[in-house]
């Protein structure tokens, strides 16, 4: 399904008339922000600023506080079932306001969680979450970034890298920038889990906010940067619309 196809859009609008007004609002904002920003990251930072001002939990994609809790728990349980241990060091790319991060921080030893995000606004909301859930003593690192070159982080540091619902909002050059640099900060044998909006048809985007990729595109791109990838079938069983890929930095 190509969500940009006018016939698909008309049919969708016919079946979901209540979604027409919100989409038109997003379209207007998209046009306005496109004119005012010079690249994708600045554009998306502005989207996050506007969404966070309205509702930080909504800004990371949760329609209610209950969903915010549930989506964080789903990410956390999955990684723990896959072997995330307290002694591991973790990098979360696009950590948002710690929907899952608060659970990772609680689980990991103090100082072992690093969250980065392009949005200073959502990181301020993340600080409130830290205080609210009494996680100060865990001394997590929260850092705003301009890009995904990860230049400020040391070599071979992380056992696990996680990016949930970040590449679903990223054009391919942003994802490639991440793949080109993330291997350097991963320990040999470390894994990098990320979710993406999957299409089996033509790759496309809706506004500048939502991007749909074929699995092979992302696996091929990762392989070009020395990362072995696989599609995570067990994630598909969970109540979530995005799919998941795991990349591994081959052990030395
Ligand atoms: C849908 S939210 C998800 C947040 C968090 N991963 C979660 O599951 O709650 C996407 C987050 O990724 C951040 N983001 C988007 N593009 C990014 C990029 N290129 N680098 C770092 N963070 C990015 C946004 O600012 C936002 O906080």
Image (cartoon, rainbow, N blue to C red):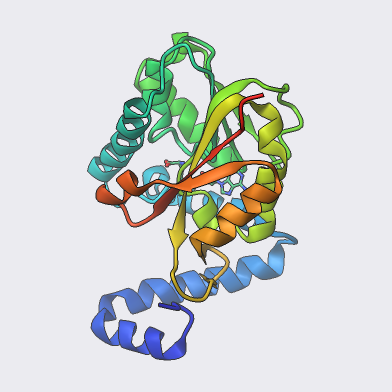
Which residue lies at the image location 52% right of the left edge and 13% below the top edge? 139
Which residue occupies the foreground of this view, 218 or 25? 218
The percent position of residue 65, horizontal first and vertical second, equals 27, 41
Quadrant where the C terminus sits is top right
The answer, for residue 11, to whether it is visible in the render is yes
Asked if residue 14 lies left or right of residue 171, the reply is left
The percent coordinates of residue 99 (x first, y second) are: 38, 35
Q: In this view of the protein, which residue sits in the foreground, 124 or 251?
A: 251
The answer to whether 34 is drawn above or below residue 238 in the figure is below
Give above or below for 17 relative to 140: below
- The residue shown at (38%, 50%) is 58
- In the image, 158 versus 50, the foreground residue is 158
Q: Nearer the viewer, residue 124 or 144?
A: 144
Horizontally, is 10 left or right of 194 in the view? left
Q: How many marks?
A: 0
Going 36% across and 76% down the picture, which residue do you hit? 21
Q: In the picture shown, does residue 122 fall above or below 35?
A: above
Residue at 67 percent of width and 34 percent of height: 183
Q: The N terminus is located in which quarter?
A: bottom left
Q: Where is residue 114 drawn, in percent x and y? A: 56, 24
Residue 133: x and y, percent? 34, 20
- Where is 171 relative to 158, above or below? below
- Tell me if I can see residue 147 in this picture: no
- Residue, far front: 252
């Amino acid at each position: 399904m190509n969500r940009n196809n006018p016939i698909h859009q008309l049919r969708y609008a016919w079946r979901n008339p209540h979604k027409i007004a919100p989409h038109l609002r997003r379209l207007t904002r998209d046009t306005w922000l496109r004119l005012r920003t010079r690249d994708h990251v600045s554009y998306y930072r502005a989207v996050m600023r506007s969404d966070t001002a309205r509702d930080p939990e909504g800004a990371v994609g949760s329609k209610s506080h209950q969903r915010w809790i549930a989506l964080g728990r789903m990410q956390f349980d999955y990684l723990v079932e896959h072997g995330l241990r307290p002694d591991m060091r973790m990098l979360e790319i696009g950590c948002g306001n710690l929907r899952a991060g608060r659970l990772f921080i609680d689980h990991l030893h103090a100082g072992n969680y690093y969250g980065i995000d392009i949005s200073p606004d959502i990181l301020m909301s993340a600080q409130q979450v830290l205080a609210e859930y009494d996680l100060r003593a865990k001394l997590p690192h929260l850092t705003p970034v301009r890009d995904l070159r990860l230049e400020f982080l040391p070599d071979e540091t992380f056992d696990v890298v996680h990016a949930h619902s970040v590449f679903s909002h990223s054009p391919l050059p942003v994802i490639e920038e991440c793949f080109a640099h993330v291997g350097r900060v991963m320990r040999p044998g470390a894994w990098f889990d990320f979710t993406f909006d999957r299409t089996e048809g033509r790759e496309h985007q809706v506004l500048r906010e939502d991007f749909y990729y074929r699995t092979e595109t992302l696996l091929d791109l990762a392989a070009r940067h020395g990362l072995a990838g696989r599609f995570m079938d067990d994630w598909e069983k969970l109540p979530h619309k995005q799919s998941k890929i795991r990349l591994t930095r081959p052990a030395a």
